[in-house]
Image (cartoon, grey):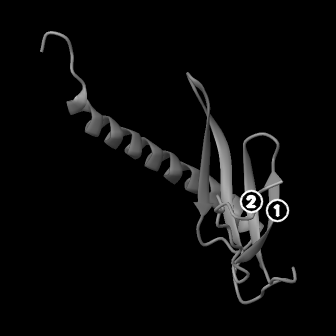
């Protein structure tokens, strides 16, 4: 039983004006699309907001699978999200590569090799 006098370790608060119902769709081979449908606090659809779509895929590398997640921008339907998923995944992968190169560039001057 917790002591009521102890400080709280978390300060989680749900924003009732920003709730979404989550649904997943997969082709069981390459990717998953997640649709986030806006809802009101009572669970009814919130028609004043558009659904959001995200994509997930795994790319194989020599070190194993690499998970890739992305936002599928400007998709209003599941069909549009499916059409836009390949480009959204490509954009996310290019961003990951650019970020890795930047991290490598920043770390390179800090590497000290013997004999230098």
Residue nearest the viewer, comparing 79 with 98? 98
**Residue 89 visible, this orientation:** yes
How far across and how far down the image is residue 28, in percent?
A: 82, 42
Residue 111 image offset from top left, x and y in percent: 25, 25
Whichever of callouts 2 and 1 sits on the residue coming sooner in the sequence is 1
Q: Is residue 111 above or below residue 80?
A: above
- Residue 40, x across and y down, in percent: 80, 84
Which residue is nearer to you in this view: 101 or 44? 44
Residue count near mark 2 (Cα–Cα under 10 Å), binned few <14, some 14–19, many ≥20: many
| SS of the residue under disc 2 | strand
Q: Which residue is mark 2?
A: 34
Q: Label 1 belongs to which residue?
A: 23
- What is the quadrant of the N terminus in the image? bottom right
- In the figure, is residue 66 to the left or right of 76? left
Tell me if 107 is positioned left or right of 90 in this view.
left
Check the image and name the residue furthest to the bottom.
48
- Residue 62: name its quadrant: top right
Identified at 71% across, 74% down, the residue is 14
Residue positioned 12% across, 15% down in the render:
116
Residue ranking furthest to the left: 116
Residue beneath the point at 21% across and 21% down: 112
> What mark, if any, has residue 112 been given in the picture?
none
Q: Is residue 79 above or below residue 93?
A: below
Image marks 2 and 1: residues in contact by CB distance under 8 Å: yes
Q: What element does badge 1 sit on? A: strand
Write the residue at 67% across / 55% down.
Answer: 55
Tell me: residue 65, above or below residue 44: above
């Amino acid at each position: 039983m917790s002591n009521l006098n102890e400080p709280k370790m978390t300060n989680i608060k749900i924003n009732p004006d920003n709730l979404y119902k989550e649904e997943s769709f997969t082709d069981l081979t390459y990717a998953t699309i997640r649709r986030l449908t806006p809802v009101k606090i009572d669970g009814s659809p919130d028609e004043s907001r558009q659904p959001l779509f995200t994509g997930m895929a795994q790319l194989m590398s020599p070190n194993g699978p690499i998970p890739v997640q992305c936002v599928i921008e400007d998709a209003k339907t599941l069909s549009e999200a499916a059409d836009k998923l390949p480009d959204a995944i490509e954009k996310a992968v290019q961003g990951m590569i650019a970020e890795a190169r930047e991290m490598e560039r920043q770390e390179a001057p800090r590497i000290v090799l013997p004999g230098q």
